[in-house]
Amino acid sequence: MRAGEAVTGEYRIITKSGEMRWLRIYRRPVWDVQENRVVAYYGVAQDITERKQAEEALRASERFARSTLDGLSAHIAIVDETGAILAVNKAWRDFADANPPVAMNVCEGADYFQVCDGARGPSSEGAAEFVEGMRAVLAGRVELFEMEYSCHSPDEQRWFVGRVTPLSG
C-alpha cells in the first residue's frame, strides 16, 4: 500500500460470539498530492461466508463424485460432445498405465474421437464403428450404444464391452 496501490484479500475472522466468518477486504490508500504522502485509507469489507461455504460444498461434492467414480471396477471415461475426455476413473487410468506403449494419450484432455479415428493395426478392428456409436449417442440420435471389441496385448487376448450413455448436463 506504500506504493499507492489497492490491496484486496480474503480473511477468516472469529466474531465476538465465536462464529467463524469470511471477509473480503478491499483497501486503498488515499494519497495527498500536495503533501506527497498517504493521508488516509479507504476500505470496504464484504461478508463472503456464504460463497466460501458454497465453494467448500462444491469441493466436497467433487471429491465424493471422484471417489465414487474411482471406486468402480469398470473402466470409465467421460467424454464431451466434441470427443474431449473430461475425466477417467482409476480403473481406466490403471489399465492405460499397465498397457504401454499407447500411441496417443487416452486420459483427460485427449480427443477420444481422434484416437478411434486414427486407430491402426490388428487391435483397431471396430474402432470406426465404436466412435460412430459414440457420436450417435452424443448427438442424441440414439439413447444407448453398446459394442464388444478386442483390445489384445502382445501376451494376452482381451475383449471388452464398450457402453456409451448420455449424462444430463
Image (cartoon, rainbow, N blue to C red):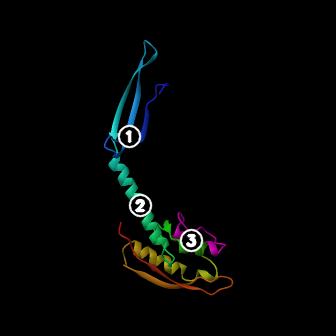
With 106 as the anchor, is 79 left or right in this view?
A: left
Quickly name the residue at label 2.
Answer: 60
Question: Which kind of residue does numbered mark 1 sit on?
Answer: Arg
Q: Can you say which quadrant of the picture contains the C terminus?
A: bottom left
Please state which of the two labelled residues, at mark 3 or mark 1, is closer to the viewer. Answer: 1
Measured along the vertical axis of the image, is residue 152 above or below residue 41?
Answer: below
First in sequence, mark 3 or 1: give its number: 1
With 95 as the anchor, is 79 left or right in this view?
A: left
Res 93 → quadrant: bottom right
The foreground one among 121 and 166 is 166
Q: Residue at 59% of width from left, 86% of height from top?
A: 158
Judge whether residue 2 is colored magenta. Answer: no
Q: Secondary structure at mark 3?
A: helix
First in sequence, mark 2 or 1: give its number: 1
Q: Which residues are magenta?
A: 97-115
Which numbered marker is on residue 24? 1
Residue 148 x %, y %: 51, 86
User: Residue placed farthest to the right in the image?
Assistant: 154
The foreground one among 133 and 71 is 71
Distance of label 2 from label 1 (alpha carbons): 22 Å
Quickly name the residue at label 3.
Answer: 93
Residue 160 x %, y %: 53, 84
Q: Residue at 45% of width from left, 80% of height from top?
A: 163
Q: Would you say residue 118 is visible in this rendering?
A: no
Question: Which kind of residue does numbered mark 3 sit on?
Answer: Arg
